Image (tube, rainbow, N blue to C red):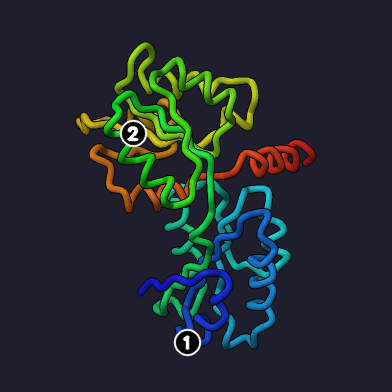
Amino acid sequence: RVARAALGEAMAQVEMEEPGLIVLDLPRLEPAGWELLQTLRALPGEQRPPVIVLAPAGDRQKAARAGATGFVGKPYTADDLAAEVTRVHGASPAADGTVLVVGSERASFRILIAEDNDINYAIVSDYLAALGHTVLRAGDGEEAIARAMEERPDLMLMDIQMHKIDGLEVIRRIRTLAARDLAQTPIVALTALTMEGDRERCLAAGADEYLAKPTDLDELRITVNRLAVPQNERRATEGETDAV
C-alpha cells in the first residue's frame, strides 16, 4: 500500500502508518526535508524504516551522510525508482509494509509547452497553471528552440507534430547545445499518433519520457513532479560534478 504525506505531517504519518519504506522527495533548497531525514535517522532501530531520497544527483553524498538508505537522482525514470525500491526492499525485513511517499505537492516549476494547437495548449496550460506552475509557450519548432535558450525552463513538453521543425528534431538540437544546463533540460514528448515504435523513437531522440495524446492530466502531473529539476539546481549539480 502507498500512502502520501506532506513534509510538515510526515512524522505523524510515520507514527500512524509504521511504514516499511519511506520515499522522501528533497528539493535542494528545502531544509525541512533534510531535517526530517535526520529525525528519522535518530529513531530507535526497530522503529527506523529505510528511506529512499529523491533529489538532484549532486546531493547523493549529502543524503548518505544524513542517513538515507537509498538514493535516486533527478531527473529519474520510473524504472530507476522501481530498481532502487527493489534493492532497498531486498535488504529490509519490513519489505511488505506501507510505502510512505513524503514531499511537497506545491513545488512550482517553469514549464515550456511547445504546441501549435490552441485547444491542446489551453487544456494542458490551464491545468499546470492551476497546480502553481509558470507556463510558457512556443508555437512551432523554431520558436521552441529560441524560447528554450531564452527562458531556460525547468521542463519542456514537446509536441512531436509541429510546423517548421518537428519535435524530434527540436529535441535532438537541444541535446547538442553547448550550455549543459540547457542541453540537459528534462523533455517530455507528446504525440497523438501513438504508433508502434513511437516511444522508442522519442527516447532515442533524447526525450526523457513519452506521453500519448489526449494527455492524461494526472499522469502528466506525476511525470512533471518526477522529472522537473529547477535550472539553478542543474547548474549547482554540474558545478559539483566538474569539481570532482
Residue occupying the point 59% across, 81% down: 48
Q: Which label is found at residue 121? A: 2
Marks 1 and 2: which is nearer the front?
A: 2
| Nearer to me, 38 or 241 | 38
Q: Which label is found at residue 231? A: none
Residue occupying the point 65% across, 24% down: 179
Q: Label 1: few (<14), some or many (≥20) within 10 Å? A: few
Total label count? 2
Q: Pick out the residue farthest to the right.
A: 243
In the depicted structure, whether residue 58 falls above or below residue 84: above
Residue occupying the point 50% across, 81% down: 13
Q: Is residue 82 left or right of residue 103?
A: left
Alpha-carbon distance for marks 1 and 2?
A: 42 Å
Residue occupying the point 55% across, 48% down: 74
The percent coordinates of residue 222 (x first, y second) are 40, 53
Q: Please tell me whether mark 1 sits on a helix, a strand or a loop.
A: helix
Residue 116's quadrant in the figure? top left
| Nearer to me, 55 or 4 | 4
Q: Amino acid at mark 1?
A: Met
Pointer 1 residue: 16
Tell me the quarter of the image containing the C terminus: top right
In the depicted structure, whether residue 126 falls above or below residue 153: below
Mark earlier in primary sequence (1, 2): 1
Q: Amino acid at mark 2?
A: Tyr
The percent coordinates of residue 234 (x first, y second) are 64, 40
Residue contact at pointers 1 and 2, CB within 8 angstroms: no
